[in-house]
Image (cartoon, coloured by chain):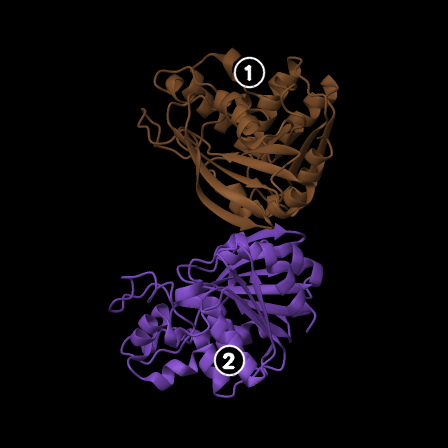
Chain colours: A purple, B brown
Amino acid sequence: MMEPLKTHLTFGGLTQFWKHDSRETKTEMKFSTFTPPGGKPKGALIWLSGLTCTDENFITKAGAQQFLAKHNLMVVCPDTSPRGLNLPGEHDAYDFGSGAGFYVNATTDGYRDHYRMYAYVANELYDLVKSKFGVSRIAISGHSMGGHGAMTIGLREPQKFTSVSAFSPIVNPAGVPWGEKAFTGYFGADRAKWNEHDTVELIKAGKRHPAPLLVDQGTKDEFLEKQLVTDRLIAACKEAGQPLTANYRDGYDHSYYFIQSFIQSHVEFHASRM
Amino acid sequence: MMEPLKTHLTFGGLTQFWKHDSRETKTEMKFSTFTPPGGKPKGALIWLSGLTCTDENFITKAGAQQFLAKHNLMVVCPDTSPRGLNLPGEHDAYDFGSGAGFYVNATTDGYRDHYRMYAYVANELYDLVKSKFGVSRIAISGHSMGGHGAMTIGLREPQKFTSVSAFSPIVNPAGVPWGEKAFTGYFGADRAKWNEHDTVELIKAGKRHPAPLLVDQGTKDEFLEKQLVTDRLIAACKEAGQPLTANYRDGYDHSYYFIQSFIQSHVEFHASRM
């Protein structure tokens, strides 16, 4: 039984917070939604958040509701990991385990039973959005670790997601410290598994999305050089012929102040393809 | 020395967080600002937040930056009380002491030395905004306890504030539980002092603002009936001839989702009078 925990009228639509029992994570999972006025959205955007975030960050801080209302879209924002567990090392760091699910299906002991955020987003939540909210067209976007999640899921399931965008995504986790740490924890040394969850590697391996990818990246992002390495995405897309609009935004950082400044263009991008 | 703790480019302007040593509270005080692109705002809005809030709530959740940028206004958001003290009872409840300064100059033992949020906002912060940010026109607004602060300060200092607005204000604190508790703590039984910090009582006593007051109030606000009592403001303004635009908003609650839905109209209201 899925019931709203809280409901707030917002720009004539509804901001809501939900919990449900997930078959994929075998935990209770939370997510937030905004549904536009009228209750008949023409499509949904699944938004995946970054490290340390929950279902609350985007819906509270991105200022997206006004644009979603205008374009008659809903948004669905899941939490970033299972909660309420106590797996080995799960709560020891901000960049692995709780708050850091990386949108993968883990294979290591303990984690394989619950850390199935790929399947949770791409299948369970996807189906729930279609059945409970009555939308047929679904796009995907996200920020940082969530931008990585949006692009890897969108490239692997192009028939399910009408368009894919990201803010400040981790485009090559298999080649940067955040991803090396998390993937070691979720997959061990199995590099083939790593590459299944790496945007640059997926594109090199032939994965494509029929719509152009849209990426916004701040030039003053404190993680750009070491963790995000956007240029590797640009090079891989160019080499592979995957259409990509990559906007470097002068002076912007990694925060939700950056996201709120450009979220209108992402909402319009997804709306125009539904 | 006033230095920014953090700076985030936002809609081409700057969201910033500051701290400084306050002469009024004799503590370090924090505030946040947004300054529009170009660095020459035509005016400033001082925003006062509600119970439990800090300098972060409005600047993070209201979605005001895009409208402030468009109208070339800055906003300044102080914290809601002094911090770092340990006065008797100061940290025992959400509605008195820390996070609950009620924008008064307290007279009770201990509090009189630090809880001078009226003087801090109306004089010290006001002067700082003029001198450090080079603006000459300043308006004032706020939410709940901060709506109370904006209206009481604006009515008592009409020559200093070009216009006054509020979301979900506590209009008659001397006659509702939140105010009775706080004013007892800040003033004891001295009812004359209570009335100096009560919007309805100030209007009854002849205080006026030359611009119409603007108030937005959600009809599903969980505090409307017991704590906010907006109708008492409407009656007092009508009786006194103080122009007031009071908008009851069907179905909206007390949250920042309500504020973000209507902040554009408040920014436009203040901008049009500068």
Q: Is residue A167 above or below residue A116?
A: above
Pick the residue in front: B16 or B112: B16
Residue density around tag 1, few if under 14, some if 14–19, many if 20 or more, within 10 Å: some
Chain of the residue under label 1:
B
Query: Where's residue B207, x and y in %?
Result: 65, 16
Asked if marks 2 and 1 fall on the same chain, the answer is no
Pinpoint the chain carrying mark 2. Answer: A
Rounded to the nearest whole Å, what is the CA distance between mark 2 and mark 1? 67 Å
Disc ID at residue B250: none
At label 1, the amino acid type is: Glu
* Residue A28 visible: no
Q: Position of residue B218 (x, y in %)?
A: 63, 41
| Quarter of the figure with residue B21 | top left
Q: Could you say which is closer to the camera, residue A187 or residue A27?
A: A187
| Residue drawn at x 56%, y 53% as measured from the top left | A7
Q: Quadrant of the C terminus of chain A?
A: bottom right
Tell me residue B223's x, y (percent): 55, 37
| B5 lies above or below A187 | above
Question: Alpha-carbon neighbours of circle 2 within 10 Å: few (<14), some, or many (≥20)?
Answer: some
In-image side of B133 versus A115 (left or right): right
Residue kind at label 2, given as amino acid type:
Ala
> Label 1 belongs to which residue?
B196
Between B231 and A53, the residue placed more toward the observer is A53
Q: Name the mark on residue A236.
A: 2
Residue B268 visible to an observer of this rendering: yes
Q: Picture coordinates of residue B262 (x, y %)?
A: 66, 44
